Image (cartoon, rainbow, N blue to C red):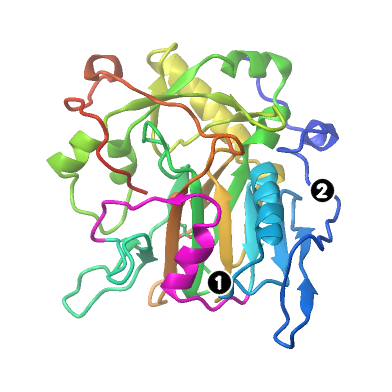
Amino acid sequence: MPPPRRTSSRARELPQAASAAPPRVDSRAGASDDGGGGRRPIEIRPLDNGFALEVRGLGLWEPVPEAAIETLADHWSRNGVLVFRRQALSEDELVAFSGRFGELDRIVRKDWQSPGRPEVIHISNLKDAAGRSIGGLGAGPIGWHSDQSYMRHPATGSLLYMVEGPSESGRTYWAHLGRAYAALSTAAQAEAEGKHALFDYHKRQSTYDDEAPMSEELRRSTPVVAHPLVNRHPITGAPSLYLDPTTTVGIQERPGRAGDALLEQLARHAAQPEFVYTDAWRVGDVVMWDNGIVMHRRDPIERARHRLLKRTTLRLPSERHIVPPGVEIEPAQSGDAAPVEAPSADRR
Ligand SMILES: O=C(O)CCC(=O)C(=O)O
Ligand SMILES: [Fe+2]
């Protein structure tokens, strides 16, 4: 396959809503109580690199008017990442806000779940008095991935709320895969089209800090699945790659090295700075992202710094978001998978 074009100019030219940022949106469609009986307008503005949008003027702890939710849902679906600052949320409030955008997913990693709300997981490097992690993902780096890509029916909406943590380390990065696709050469686009990547949670789990070896139960409930490498946005029709180098183990139509090479090339292309949004975390940040059109990664967390984020996971509606359709792959096709059973539940 010819090398992907390194320029991002094409991404900027394309009038595709899923890969182009709005110039500046000042939405008065929804507003929240200003505490004095009045209404504050919400303001939505593009952040660095255009696709991530910062939303100002909403306190997510209070009921957000339906018109504002509709505006946010539309921007989320088209752009992939929404950022809110200086929030202060109970777990009930985090769950209530998240649930306005899709059905909450209850993950089965009991060791990551909040003792108070099973729909919330803790992402943390903290340990309890017995030396056990209070959440998932430890302190190490996490490579580029897409949450739940290894599920046949992935719950593609993720919300992270920063309760406590450093700004100097543990940065998270989101790469827009619609923009990355748009900047590929025509030949590279044709090469990716019609292919299916194979996703294996076993590969991803082995990269985590602070994790026991995979249990038989976990192995059985996460058979290798295949998803299209290119999906189209249900509203705009804009094509987007579906990539997760931490989890993919090949391409169904290109067994062996050839498939691996194509995946590596696409992942390298998509991780170029022009497709990536990052920001230093601040306490009170809420970031919501759509795993159907972005992938993300995290830097390691500095030693001796405490970090706690709270996460919810959503089944985003496929009428509004790309939800990659998956099929389970028999062990013989994927090489090393354990006996296949229908996935009983979802993970991260
Ligand atoms: O710790 C982070 O910043 C990101 C963790 C992550 O990948 C996730 O919550 O899906
Ligand atoms: Fe993640």
Mark 2 secondary-structure assignment: loop
Q: Quadrant of the N terminus?
A: top right
Ligand 1 sits in which quadrant? bottom left
User: From where the camera sits, is residue 294 visible?
Assistant: yes
Is residue 165 visible to us here? Answer: no
**Residue under the image location 55 percent in, 52 percent down:** 101
Amino acid type for the residue under numbered disc 1: Glu
**Position in image of residue 252 (x %, y %):** 41, 15
Task: Tell me which segment is drawn in magenta.
Answer: 86-111
Q: Which of 18 and 280 is in front in this view?
A: 18
- Label 1 sits on a secondary structure element that is loop
> Which residue corresponds to the image point at 86% horizontal and 51% vertical from the top-left?
23
Where's residue 258, x and y in %? Answer: 46, 15
Question: Which circle marks residue 129 in the picture?
Answer: none
Tell whether circle 1 marks a residue whose Cβ is less than 8 angstroms from ligand 1: no
Q: Report the residue marked by disc 2.
A: 22
Judge the density around disc 2: few (<14), some (14-19), many (≥20) Cα neighbours within 10 Å: some
Q: Name the residue under label 1.
A: 168
